[in-house]
Amino acid sequence: MSSERMKKVSPIQLVLKAGLLVDELSTLGPSTPADLAKATDEPRPSIYRIVSTLEQAGLVRRTDDSRVELGTGILRLAEAASDALIDRTTLSEVLEHMQSQLGLTSAFWIYRNETAVCLDQVDATDVDLHELSSGRILPLHAGAASHVILAFSPDQTLEELTKNEPFPALASQTPTDAKSLAKLVKQTRADGWRLESNEVVNGIAALGFPVFNADGTLFGALTAAGLVDHVNASAKEVRVALEAAAHKLTEARKSFIPVATGASFDAPDSKGSVLAKAATLINALATERIATSSQLTEMINEPASSVYRMLGTLQEIGWIEQLSNRGAFRLGTKMISLAGNMLNNLDVRRASMPILRSIHEATGETTFLCVRRNSRAVCIERIEGKRVNSRLLSLGSSLPLHVGAAPRVILAFEGREAWEEYATLLGQNPDGRFSARDKSKLLADLGSIQNDGYVISDDDLTPGIAAVGAPIFNHRNHVVASLSVSGLREGILAPAHGSASITELVAQGARELSLYLGAQLSD
């Protein structure tokens, strides 16, 4: 019966079913083929067939326990969709200027499928706001960005949203009802901005302003967020700066025209299924950013009639959008929300445990996972060594970024500007022990680490103890964490452990975690 059902599925319907399967993975998270078959009302052979093709395209991947989850190709497509939606250079400049001026986390959000999706973000100087970071998704009933988007969207957006009350609270707030939400929206629209406290994260406040398209419709929301006391104490200054920044983005939006990259695209062999060809089409569009149907026909070497059918189906599932009637195409904003859901589910700490354990078992040494928190590196996962343990970086403790292997390798891959800022911070220390010569040595050391791709710390913190650290990158190839191993220097600096040295094990482990997070790494 399953085979008869599969025969009735037209090739183009496979694309529709692939879209449904990806939607389910976005909602459910990692799932078994049986779960997906039940959720999509499809036979397992059909699910296996779709998953196999999507896996080859990088849109889904298998977990260690053989479940299926969204693949890192989704993150790359989301980046391409964002590039075709807004001038990313201007946006980055605005966000970085706001963060520098106010010391708050600055972020830009767009509306997608009854949620607010964070398109980009620059962290505050005093606290990292993971719930408000790039790719994160908020429901429209909570948060400054959501309230601004809801207030300046068409009235039917609120009407549709209020059909699903009561709305759950995100922090310690009481649930919001439709009447209260409508009142809040009315007030936000009248004020032209929104200030909220403790709605998304306890102890955090945010202020938001709308950004508009050239035709006056809402494009998105610009926000500044930080500790409640900080935001409240400087609310007027924040409001003035945020309004000016929102105005600048609105002006930039008026003149923004998505431009094709002109990059070359090597289409694979066209003998695959329609689903494989559709994946090739969206990859071509991701490469070019914006293209007409005739350009796509030429890029993927497919008949015009086949490309038209695929474009229509991909529009139907929201993976691509047409700029105007008979106009060029770009990747859909749905990719951004899919990426947001994926980023919400990524957990580098969980993913690091098998790698940390494997290196520990191969070496017997202490293994660490660290992330940056302000001017320090914090150990968020650790496996104790069998022979010796360093007490300087216990679980939950931290070290300055210029001290030790794990901290220094994070700083080294943040770039020259970050080095200068950190060196300036050290120079302001009242004990006056960080001299110009120390700065010169630090910058040279960081440059060497960046060139080598890893760092070796030998007797830096504890006599007789050495460590190796390597950087971990995210889908934007920004350093987000470090993997390191520490132990007696005779063991750490030994040329090899079995078939690989400790340095090679650490570098490979960091690479695996970077690929898990979607980094684009060269071979």
Image (cartoon, grey):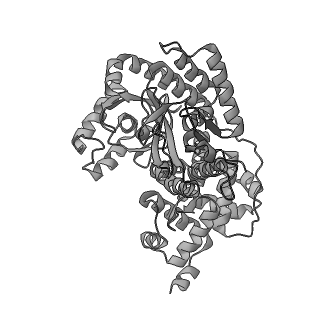
Q: Nearer the viewer, residue 356 or 96?
A: 356
Residue 445 shows in the view: yes
Q: Position of residue 316 (x, y in %)?
A: 54, 58
The structure residue drawn at horizontal position 65% and vertical position 16%, both measured from the top left corner, is: 437
Q: Nearer the viewer, residue 491 or 25?
A: 491
- Where 40 falls versus 229 (above or below)? below
Q: Nearer the viewer, residue 503 or 288?
A: 503
Q: Nearer the viewer, residue 13 or 264?
A: 264
Q: Position of residue 200 (x, y in %)?
A: 33, 39
Q: Position of residue 14 (x, y in %)?
A: 58, 69
Q: Position of residue 41 (x, y in %)?
A: 44, 73
The structure residue drawn at horizontal position 65% and vertical position 47%, both measured from the top left corner, is: 503
Residue 216 shows in the view: no
Residue 103 placement, left or right of 60: left
Residue 490 placement, left or right of 200: right
- Where 309 falls versus 191 (above or below)? below
Farthest-out residue, bottom: 1
> What number of labels is visible?
0
- Where 28 falls versus 235 (above or below)? below
The structure residue drawn at horizontal position 42% and vertical position 18%, both measured from the top left corner, is: 240
The structure residue drawn at horizontal position 37% and vertical position 26%, both measured from the top left corner, is: 192
Q: Residue 195 occupies which quadrant of the picture?
A: top left
